[in-house]
Image: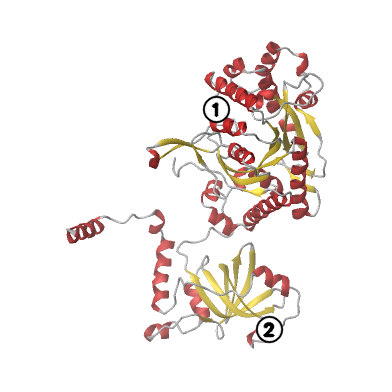
């Protein structure tokens, strides 16, 4: 029976045609495929397991640029510094008995000189007629069989050309990876944005600035983590797939768990709920940097999958969180630019200097509407406010019918104020209806039940953070979450359901706390001067190819 099954499997494999990808029929692919076969036939391993590089391009440049290390004759004799490096071949020019090439690693390039007599290729050993037609010249082999895009290792000696360019005299070249598809055109590069985002590997190879953006992204995340750890926050991890969702007003992505009889589950829309449960458990300060998923629109500042920092500190309030956030932004500015005053070029070409010096200005939401829209909402009754929102805001009239006064004020702020908030500013004291997870304001003027101790920070017209004095009254918390359920029943799709376990955890006792969420992608946009979130996410969400 086993033999029968094996024969059946073999027949299926023989009769099933292999899928032919579009690129496999191109002339470039077929030519490189033929070169690959020749390379193997003359003893060169096109895909070796390992290569030892003694240094990086950056280290070589920092150590030897401008130093008196000698000329090409000294390098040929082996009397100059010896190094071994590796990178992708991006330029090649044959010039008689020598050829000059450039190899690229990370966002650095190094010039290589290959000599007809002294440069050898690892493993290259043609025999018979091949030996006569292609003598054992490393230069000839590289010129004929190595293509732009191939990854090579070079061992040799450094020198400066007559023009002063730091160059590596190749004594031994090792093919590390034979590429079967060409690089984008070196002059025009990648100009199609869809191709750039879909094939980010080509974008990184073709444009050093793109590599630098993602290098800075990594550094920014590291700096954020360092700031948290300096304030004694502990890093934690919470589930991405959850049986309930909450912590934000957003539609979730829905999935199911086969192991639990196809139980419906959700990708998290926020980190908040589980982090607060850990506060109850006794972790005094904690943070998470992780992916969040919201099934909403895609635009310049929104991608359905994005990265958030959320941090919570027991015995802090939203004033402490303002200080903490200012520290994060100030630290990043000084580490990347050496100053808290950072240059930024707006989308319309306007040059702006963003000042991250603490403390940042604070403006109440109502005060910002009065300042930028010249509307004093406190002088309007609910009917007048609804009429104004319908006139001034891009909003579904059906939504306005059921909107509370606080939500109407928030609508005015979003449509009439946000775009004017260029320099760093904290918008404080939001209407209570905007969040059910926040403490009411300690206000002596009678508005304590109308506003909450919440702030959102804005820079260049975009929200970069959201923070609260966290609500820890379980009775009030349940009441506000039940109000959210009522709003959902009236058609507000973005409100989240009641989480019974969350209320239960608060009943166990959560200390007074401050919490903050910062969008990492928007943070990177800001400090790398990018105007769309797609430029700072390695693989932003795209439509299926051809759709």
Circle 1 sits on which residue? 498
Front residue of 217/192: it is: 217
In terms of image quadrants, where is residue 533?
top right
Q: Nearer the viewer, mark 2 or mark 1?
A: 1
Q: Position of residue 379 (x, y in %)?
A: 78, 14
Which secondary structure lies at badge 1?
Answer: loop
Quadrant that contains the N terminus: bottom left
Q: Is residue 216 left or right of residue 52?
A: right
Front residue of 56/344: it is 56
Please determine whether, in this image, residue 502 is positioned above or below residue 70: above
Write down the residue under mark 2.
80
Give the vertical position of 215 relative to 62 (above or below): above
Q: Is residue 205 visible?
A: yes
Judge from the rendering whether residue 94 lies leftward or rightward of residue 219; answer left or right: left
Q: Secondary structure at mark 2?
A: loop
Residue, far bottom: 77
**Quick one: 418 or 169, which is closer to the camera?**
418
The image shows residue 379, relative to residue 414, as above or below, that is above
The answer to whether residue 464 is visible is no
Task: Mark 2 or mark 1: name the one nearer the start of the chain.
Answer: 2
| Classed neighbour count for the residue bearing mark 2: other residues with Cα under 10 Å, few (<14), some (14–19), many (≥20) | many
């Amino acid at each position: 029976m086993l033999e029968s099954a094996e024969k059946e499997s073999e027949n299926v494999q023989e009769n099933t045609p292999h899928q032919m990808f579009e690129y496999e029929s191109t002339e470039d692919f077929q030519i490189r495929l033929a070169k690959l076969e020749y390379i193997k036939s003359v003893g060169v391993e096109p895909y070796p397991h390992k290569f030892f590089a003694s240094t990086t391009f950056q280290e070589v440049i920092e150590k030897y640029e401008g130093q008196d290390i000698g000329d090409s004759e000294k390098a040929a004799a082996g009397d100059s510094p010896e190094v071994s490096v590796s990178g992708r071949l991006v330029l090649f020019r044959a010039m008689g008995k020598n050829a000059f090439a450039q190899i690229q690693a990370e966002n650095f390039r190094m010039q290589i000189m290959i000599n007809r007599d002294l440069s050898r290729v690892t493993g290259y050993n043609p025999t018979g007629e091949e030996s006569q037609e292609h003598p054992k010249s490393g230069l000839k082999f590289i010129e004929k069989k190595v293509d732009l895009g191939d990854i090579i290792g070079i061992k040799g000696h450094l020198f400066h050309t007559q023009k002063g360019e730091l160059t590596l005299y190749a004594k031994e070249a090792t093919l590390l990876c034979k590429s079967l598809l060409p690089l984008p055109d070196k002059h025009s590069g990648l100009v199609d944005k869809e191709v750039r985002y879909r094939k980010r590997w080509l974008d990184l190879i073709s444009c050093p600035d793109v590599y630098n953006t993602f290098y800075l992204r990594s550094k920014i995340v590291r700096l954020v983590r360092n700031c948290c750890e300096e304030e004694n926050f502990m890093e934690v991890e919470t589930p991405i797939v959850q049986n309930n969702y909450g912590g934000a007003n957003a539609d979730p992505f829905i999935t199911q768990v086969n192991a639990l009889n196809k139980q419906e589950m959700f990708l998290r829309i926020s980190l908040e709920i589980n982090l607060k449960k850990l506060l109850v458990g006794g972790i005094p300060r904690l943070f998470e940097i992780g992916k969040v998923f919201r099934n909403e629109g895609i635009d310049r500042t929104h991608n359905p999958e994005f990265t958030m920092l959320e941090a919570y500190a027991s015995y802090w309030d939203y004033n402490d969180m303002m200080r903490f956030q200012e520290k994060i932004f100030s630290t990043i500015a000084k580490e990347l630019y050496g100053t808290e005053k950072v240059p930024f070029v707006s989308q319309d070409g306007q040059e702006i200097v963003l000042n991250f010096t603490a403390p940042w200005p604070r403006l109440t939401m109502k005060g910002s509407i009065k300042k930028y829209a010249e509307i004093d909402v406190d002088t309007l009754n609910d009917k007048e406010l609804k009429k104004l929102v319908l006139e001034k805001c891009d909003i579904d009239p059906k939504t306005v019918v059921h909107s509370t006064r606080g939500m109407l004020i928030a609508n005015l702020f979003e449509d009439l104020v946000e775009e004017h908030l260029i320099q760093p500013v904290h918008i404080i004291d939001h209407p209570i209806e905007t969040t059910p997870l926040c403490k009411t304001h300690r206000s002596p003027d009678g508005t304590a039940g109308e506003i909450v101790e919440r702030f959102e920070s804005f820079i260049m017209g975009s929200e970069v953070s959201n923070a609260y004095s966290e609500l820890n009254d379980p009775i009030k918390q349940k009441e506000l979450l039940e109000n959210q359920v009522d709003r959902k029943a009236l058609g507000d799709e973005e409100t989240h359901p009641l989480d019974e376990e969350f209320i239960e955890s608060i009943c166990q006792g959560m200390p007074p706390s401050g919490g903050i969420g910062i969008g990492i992608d928007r943070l990177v946009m800001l400090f790398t001067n990018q105007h769309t979130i797609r430029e700072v996410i390695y693989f932003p969400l795209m439509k299926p190819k051809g759709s």
